[in-house]
Image (spheres, coloured by chain):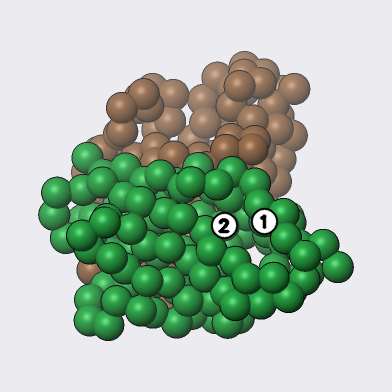
Chain colours: A brown, B green
Amino acid sequence: SAVISQKPSRDICQRGTSLTIQCQVDSQVTMMFWYRQQPGQSLTLIATANQGSEATYESGFVIDKFPISRPNLTFSTLTVSNMSPEDSSIYLCSANSDMNTEAFFGQGTRLTVV
Amino acid sequence: AQSVSQHNHHVILSEAASLELGCNYSYGGTVNLFWYVQYPGQHLQLLLKYFSGDPLVKGIKGFEAEFIKSKFSFNLRKPSVQWSDTAEYFCAVNAWGKSTFGDGTTLTVKP
């Protein structure tokens, strides 16, 4: 199993600013992902964080808005750029040790944009 | 691309009632199937998972699920719910490491 820590756990931000969320896994993992859970909705995959290369974004998400870094096998960041109230969501980091194992999730970052 | 459909958006039960939450998925290849639970104000927790083998899988807290390949279904069951089972339940499929979630079912158990 993997334990995933996210920071911050919550934040309230002004519109137009940016927030970087950190995700730390307690063991080396092959795959890391970022999800968004908007209020009252399910989880939507934002992107796959690729170690040492550019992230792979899902339809509807772009690098300029959600830049992602993954410098090594245990750490990733997601930045929510130029925030608007519509970005208010829970952002979750997820990791798999490989594609045939369960995904572990962090506790999430609850973001409110005012 | 994979997709997941959960049949019930909100289920209300009395304690000791039996529970079944429906989940159907769409994907052309081999998938791994999961049920997650999210208690109010808490993060996702894994209830149970299916990778291969016995299609009836047992998870934590008395939950079980049955994988029926011909129906592309993975329904969650519990014979007798408790007030503490009040939560949001998500069915998910995982292919190539990526998870796709259903819209979730809110379960309210009345004491």
Query: Which residue is depicted at the point 26% across and 46% down?
Result: B26
Quadrant of res A15? top right
Q: On screen, B3 above or below A93?
A: above
Circle 1/circle 2 CB separation < 8 Å: yes
Q: Residues within 10 Å of mark 1 (few under 14, many from 20)?
A: many
Report the front residue among B34 and A111: B34
Which is in the foreground here, disc 1 or disc 2? Answer: 1
Drawn side of residue A35 relative to residue B100, left or right? right
Residue type indicated by callout 2: Tyr
Tag 1, which chain?
Answer: B
Which residue is more in the foreground, B22 or A96? B22
Q: Quadrant of the C terminus of chain A?
A: top right
Residue at the image position 67 percent from the left and 56 percent from the top = B107
Q: Which residue is mark 2?
A: B89
Q: Would you place residue A29 above or below residue A70 in this image?
A: below
When asked about the image quadrant of residue A58, the answer is top left
Seen as rendered, the residue at the extreme left is B29
Q: Position of residue A84 (x, y in %)?
A: 62, 19
Find disc 1 in the rendering and name its residue.
B107
Residue A93, how many percent across, how many down?
47, 53
The reply to whether residue B104 is visible in this rendering is yes
What's the residue at 49%, 35% (across, down)? A79
Residue at 58 percent across and 50 percent down: it is B105
Image coordinates for residue B16, horizontal then vertical, percent: 73, 75
Same chain for labels 1 and 2? Say yes or no. Answer: yes
Query: Badge 2: how crowded within 10 Å, few (<14), some, or many (20+)?
Result: many
Q: In terms of secondary structure, where does tag 1 sit?
A: strand
- Front residue of B34 and A99: B34
Whether residue A114 is situated above or below residue A3 in the rendered picture: above
Classify residue B52 by image quadrant.
Answer: bottom left
